Image: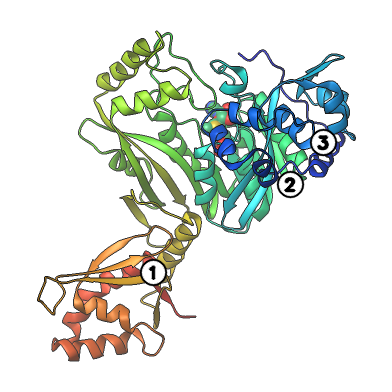
């Protein structure tokens, strides 16, 4: 357990701190300019020395707050008093973010500016979280409250940009997802099993002037009995952890169950907490075991009448998975603890016949009509995932009503033709998507011609009739061949319905 106290959120003090941070311009770009891009990037890789060297003799307000709050290093009291004129050192201590004596202020938390890209564009937040391994100079306590990490950013980017009445962030941690969805929700409920995490999340909401979030403590869906949400987002504690003695159980990543049971529990339970049409989105890990792929197991957990779209981004072997998460806890192969931990992980996977572990995103929807069921592997770099998921869902609903009368080729689509040397006819024609899921699909000349003609002049029926003439095939035959592939191009955003 942590030796440092949890924050004590208090609106007036938080507002004073926010005003001081604003006046100091404690934002990502000014800090990056202050200590340089290379030092800034080095901090992201766990090195604070380059920043310390860059601002060693700098007693400015920004450098002082940077060392104190971004790096988590003690600073002279007189400098901190000058840097926080509204809150003062006593106020910072009262918020539970530092301890102080007459000479020195010692931070007990980090407070960093975090810039974010989501479907609404770039945002910047101040996010307080526990001191990290670098600031602690050692392993993390089991009740550590994580700051914004890679997984937080992944989830933020994949949330479908919908305006909703009620949203839920389950396992809110420092509160970053709740803050993000609060921009597009009437109200948000943010839950966590950890009172410490909720204290950070509440403080962060106050610091960022966000007032439409209600915080509740409890495990999984327990604190939400009888309620329903239009949007549920969660970066749950999905890390698969062996239940053997000596293996640390980090609250921030481990829900205490065996294997991927926490993800199973989540996807089985979440639908009951969705309004009709409501969407749940989460990150997760799933095991391929006993000869059944993780994607097939996941699909079996979700009743057939629900929409389910799973995108698996990565698959790791048991060894690669174990190494990843042992290192994440701060233990490296040079440490004596590494081998016993590796043995525990590999034994657990072997005992349960796990051959690989998938990582990806899950989207569930309480849709109506023909359910959307799609599980796929996408390893290529992606962008604007939230918007792309939204396009897919909308297209699914549209196609359920029939083929749109007129289709347009999306503006980010290009065509590549590959020819054998000396041949005039292409042996491969590819359609490539510039954004979103950046898909590439192989098409035949008829489908390529169809897509090429979707420029707003002719209806779908007129294009198909012209192609039947051109290729000298009966219309019905051509249409039966093209239609499912056109539908698939509409779902994937290569073709869009004209307004
Ligand atoms: C990976 S962190 C996610 C934090 C944050 N939402 C983000 O995206 O960065 C998982 C969070 O789930 C919380 N948690 C762990 N077990 C839980 C449970 N049984 N019920 C609810 N929350 C839980 C942890 O305390 C932690 O804050």
Give the CA separation, mark 1 to mark 2: 36 Å
Tags 3 and 2 touching, CB below 8 Å: no
- Disc number at residue 400? 1
Left of 224 or right of it: where is 254?
left
* SS of the residue under disc 2: loop
Asked whether 329 or 184 is in front, the reply is 329
Asked whether 341 or 268 is in front, the reply is 341
x and y percentages locating residue 224 in the rendered image: 61, 37
Q: Is residue 55 above or below residue 124?
A: above
- Earlier-in-chain disc, 3 versus 2: 3
Quarter of the displayed picture in which ligand 1 can be seen: top right
Give the CA separation, mark 3 to mark 2: 20 Å
Q: Is residue 206 above or below residue 163?
A: above
x and y percentages locating residue 318 in the rendered image: 29, 26
Location of mark 3 (residue):
17
**Residue at the left extreme?**
422
Location of mark 2 (residue):
212
| Quadrant occupied by the N terminus | top right
Q: Is residue 255 above or below residue 191?
A: above
Q: Nearer the viewer, mark 1 or mark 3?
A: 3
Q: Residues within 10 Å of mark 3 (few under 14, many from 20)?
A: many
Q: Residues within 10 Å of mark 2 (few under 14, many from 20)?
A: some
Q: Is residue 46 visible?
A: yes
Q: In which quadrant of the rendered view does residue 197 lie?
A: top right
* SS of the residue under disc 1: helix
Q: Is residue 273 visible?
A: no
Classify mark 3 as within 8 Å of ligand 1 or not, answering yes or no: no
Residue at horizontal 44%, vertical 17%?
A: 331
Asked whether 335 or 488 is in front, the reply is 335
């Amino acid at each position: 357990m942590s030796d440092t106290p949890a924050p004590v959120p208090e609106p007036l003090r938080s507002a004073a701190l926010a005003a001081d941070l604003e006046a100091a311009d404690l934002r990502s770009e000014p800090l990056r300019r202050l200590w340089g891009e290379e030092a800034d990037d080095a901090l992201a890789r766990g090195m604070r020395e380059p920043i310390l060297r860059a601002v060693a003799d700098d007693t400015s307000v920004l450098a002082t707050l940077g060392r104190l709050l971004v790096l988590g290093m003690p600073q002279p009291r007189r400098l901190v008093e000058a840097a926080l004129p509204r809150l003062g050192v006593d106020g910072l201590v009262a918020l539970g973010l530092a301890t102080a004596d007459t000479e020195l202020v010692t931070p007990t938390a980090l407070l960093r500016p975090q810039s974010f890209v989501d479907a609404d564009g770039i945002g910047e937040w101040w996010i307080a979280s526990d001191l990290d391994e670098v600031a602690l100079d050692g392993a993390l306590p089991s009740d550590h409250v994580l700051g914004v990490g890679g997984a937080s950013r992944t989830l933020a980017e994949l949330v479908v940009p919908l305006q909703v009445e009620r949203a839920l962030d389950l396992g809110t941690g420092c509160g970053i997802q709740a803050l993000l969805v609060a921009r597009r929700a009437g109200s948000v409920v943010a839950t966590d099993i950890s009172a410490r995490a909720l204290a950070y999340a509440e403080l962060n909401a106050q610091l960022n002037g966000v007032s439409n979030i209600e915080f509740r403590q409890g495990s999984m869906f327990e604190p939400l009995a009888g309620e329903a949400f239009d949007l549920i987002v969660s970066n749950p504690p999905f890390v698969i952890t062996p239940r053997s003695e000596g293996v640390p159980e980090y609250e921030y990543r481990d829900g205490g169950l065996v294997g991927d049971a926490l993800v199973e529990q989540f996807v089985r339970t979440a639908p009951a907490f969705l309004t009709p049409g409501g969407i749940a989105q989460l990150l997760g890990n799933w095991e391929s075991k006993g000869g059944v792929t993780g994607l097939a197991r996941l699909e079996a957990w979700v009743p057939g009448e629900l929409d389910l779209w799973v995108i698996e981004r990565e698959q790791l072997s048991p060894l690669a998975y174990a190494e990843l998460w042992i290192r994440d806890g701060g233990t490296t192969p040079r440490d004596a603890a590494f081998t016993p931990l590796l043995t525990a992980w590999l034994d657990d996977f072997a005992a349960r016949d796990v051959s690989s572990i998938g990582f990806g995103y899950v989207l569930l929807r309480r849709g109506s009509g023909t359910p959307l069921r799609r599980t796929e592997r996408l390893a290529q770099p992606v962008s604007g995932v939230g918007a792309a998921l939204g396009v897919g869902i909308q297209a699914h609903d549209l196609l359920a009503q029939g083929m749109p009368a007129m289709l347009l080729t999306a503006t980010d689509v290009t065509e590549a033709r590959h020819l054998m040397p000396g041949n005039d006819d292409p042996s491969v024609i590819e359609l490539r998507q510039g954004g979103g899921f950046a898909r590439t699909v192989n098409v035949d000349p008829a489908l390529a011609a169809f897509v090429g003609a979707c420029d707003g002049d002719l209806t779908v029926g007129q294009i198909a009739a012209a192609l039947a003439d051109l290729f000298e095939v009966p219309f019905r035959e051509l249409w039966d061949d093209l239609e499912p592939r056109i539908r698939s191009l509409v779902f994937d955003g290569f073709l869009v319905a004209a307004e």
